[in-house]
């Protein structure tokens, strides 16, 4: 999961941005695809500028500002 989010997804995003000559894009993910976007943006914050909107269809989790601390703890523990 982490490999796909941190290595494969950035390549795909950069490919689309290069081909379309755009600065950012809208990411649409379904189920696992939503989780991949969350992991990518948490691990590689520079992609926050490249993704202007995430549309999460059937997400595995919903993030709320109160849970961000727990998310960081979980990521550091894994």
Image (cartoon, rainbow, N blue to C red):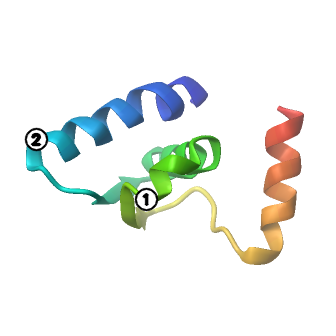
Q: Residue reaching furthest bottom?
A: 65
Q: Residue 23 location in percent, x, y?
A: 25, 57
Q: What element carries label 2?
A: helix
Q: Is mark 1 on a helix, strand or loop?
A: loop
Please, is residue 49 above or below residue 33 in the view? below
Query: Tag 1: Cα neighbours inside 10 Å, few (<14), some, or many (≥20)?
Result: few
75 to the left or right of 12:
right
Q: Residue reaching furthest left?
A: 20
Please, is residue 20 above or below residue 5 in the view? below
Q: Nearer the viewer, residue 61 or 5?
A: 5
Q: Residue 66 location in percent, x, y?
A: 82, 75
20 to the left or right of 66:
left
24 to the left or right of 35:
left
Instruction: Give me the residue at 29% from left, 58% from top.
Output: 24
Q: Residue 67 location in percent, x, y?
A: 80, 68
Query: Tag 2: Cα neighbours inside 10 Å, few (<14), some, or many (≥20)?
Result: few
Instruction: Give me the residue at 49% from left, 57% from top.
Output: 48
**Circle 1 is placed at which residue position?**
49
**Circle 2 is placed at which residue position?**
19
Q: How many labels does the image show?
A: 2
Q: Are marks 2 and 1 in contact (CB under 8 Å)?
A: no
Please, is residue 68 above or below residue 18 in the view? below
How far is the residue under mark 2 from the one under mark 1?
A: 17 Å
| Circle number at residue 5 | none
Instruction: Give me the residue at 89% from left, 36% from top.
Output: 77
Instruction: Give me the residue at 21% from left, 46% from top.
Output: 17
Indicate which disc, 2 or 1, sits on the residue closer to the N terminus: 2
């Amino acid at each position: 999961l982490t490999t796909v989010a941190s290595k494969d997804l950035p390549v795909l995003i950069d490919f689309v941005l290069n081909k379309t000559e755009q600065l950012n894009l809208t990411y649409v993910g379904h189920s696992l695809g939503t989780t991949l976007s969350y992991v990518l943006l948490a691990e590689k914050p520079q992609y926050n500028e490249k993704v202007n909107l995430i549309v999460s269809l059937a997400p595995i989790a919903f993030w709320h500002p109160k849970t961000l601390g727990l998310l960081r703890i979980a990521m550091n523990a894994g």
